DNA sequence: ATGGTAGCGCTGCTA
């Protein structure tokens, strides 16, 4: 199985890039975040033409998550398990079963500023995600933009982030709880030494070309899958302008591969 | 270089 997770920062702005990437890389499952579109505007037909079933959860100009699959897409649920999709105000989690694996595409709240109500919301959202994961039986991959750098090896300069969101002990503890529960950070399992690789670079100040990024996009997998991992890497090329009219996303795709059960 | 980038959408918010 080859799975990719990619915060595209507007699917409308990135559609050409996403389609080209899918054709070049042929993932079995593709999780997208920050689609910034409503369900009615989601280009399901374009993805179907490439061989993908798809599900989307979005309501307009912010947030929005999707799952594309060419190995089946069953038991789709938008939002947390205990909420009705129609009542969700911030579309940040979508689940589906693809090829026998429960896949969660998540876009964790940014938090904005330490101590703000948005920061508290981020922490409570992560706690809710932990409870959500605990309900899942069988193989599982939780992937997306976590807006948390798990350790100092996941930021270009720890000193530059003192007092900032994404690196506080509380955020790291909330993420660490998912690992304590048995999930494995796929990239770090295969690439134990940092710093990096990074998955996000600020658009401002030429951060990408200066290597000033963070690793905040993650694929957390259950132990069975962790034991069968064969690859995990960040496609930095997709963060470059390339032969496209529009800008790249500020995030690069994270690809994870594992052997299917014999 | 007194601003820095990008998307959405039309004013300022979000990241």
Image (cartoon, rainbow, N blue to C red):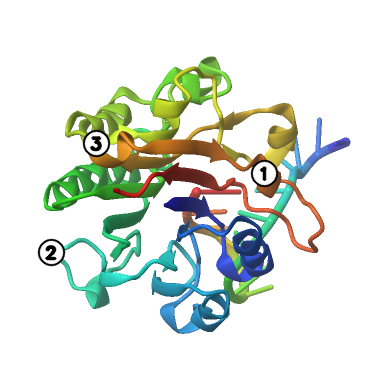
Pointers 3 and 2 in contact (CB under 8 A)? no
Q: Residues within 10 Å of mark 2 (few under 14, many from 20)?
A: few
Which comes before the other along the chain, label 2 or label 1?
2
**Are discs 3 and 2 located on one and the same chain?**
yes
Would you identify the image quadrant in which residue A189 lies? top left
Same subunit, tags 2 and 1: yes
Q: CA distance from mark 3 to mark 2?
A: 25 Å
Give the residue at mark 2. A82
Residue A140, label in figure: none
Disc 3 and disc 1 in contact, CB within 8 angstroms: no
In the rendered structure, which disc, 3 or 2, sits on the residue that comes first in sequence? 2
At 42% from the left and 79% from the top, the residue drawn is: A39
Which element type, helix, strand or loop, lies under badge 3? helix
Residue at 15% across, 53% down: A136
Query: Where is residue A185 drawn, in percent x and y?
Result: 36, 33
Dots 2, 1 in contact, CB < 8 A: no
Between A260 and A76, which is closer to the camera in this rendering? A260
Pair 2/1: label in front? 2
Between label 3 and label 1, give the one nearer the viewer. 3
Q: Which residue is mark 1?
A: A203
Residue placed under numbered mark 3 in the picture: A223
Q: Residue at x 51, y 57 (%)?
A: A27
For numbered disc 2, what is the local secondary structure? loop
Q: Quadrant of residue A219?
A: top left
Answer with left or right where residue A73 lies relative to residue A53.
left
Q: Residues within 10 Å of mark 3 (few under 14, many from 20)?
A: some
Q: Relative to A182, is A17 above or below?
A: below
Residue A160, percent from left and from top:
55, 20
């Amino acid at each position: 199985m080859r799975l990719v997770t990619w915060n595209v920062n507007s699917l409308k702005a990135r559609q050409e890039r996403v389609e080209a990437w899918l054709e070049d890389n042929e993932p079995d499952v593709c999780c997208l975040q920050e689609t910034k579109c409503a369900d009615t505007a989601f280009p399901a037909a374009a993805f179907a033409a490439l061989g993908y079933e798809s599900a989307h959860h979005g309501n307009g100009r912010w947030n929005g998550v999707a799952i594309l699959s060419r190995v089946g897409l069953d038991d789709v649920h938008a939002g947390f398990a205990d909420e009705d999709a129609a009542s969700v105000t911030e579309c940040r989690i979508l689940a589906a079963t693809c090829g026998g694996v429960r896949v969660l595409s998540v876009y964790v709240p940014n938090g904005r500023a330490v101590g703000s109500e948005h920061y508290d919301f981020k922490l409570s959202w992560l706690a809710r995600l932990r409870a959500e994961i605990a309900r899942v039986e069988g193989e599982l991959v939780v992937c997306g933009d976590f807006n948390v750098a798990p350790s100092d090896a996941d930021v270009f300069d720890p000193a530059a982030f003192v007092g900032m969101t994404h690196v506080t002990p509380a955020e790291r503890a909330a993420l660490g709880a998912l690992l304590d529960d048995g999930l494995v950070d796929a990239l770090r399992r295969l690439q134990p030494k940092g710093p990096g690789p990074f998955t996000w670079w600020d658009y401002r100040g030429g951060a990408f070309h200066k290597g000033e990024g963070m690793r905040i996009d993650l694929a957390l997998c259950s132990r069975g899958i962790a034991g069968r991992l064969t690859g995990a890497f960040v496609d930095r090329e997709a963060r470059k302008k390339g032969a496209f009219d529009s800008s790249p996303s500020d995030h690069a795709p994270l690809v994870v591969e594992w052997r299917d059960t014999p």
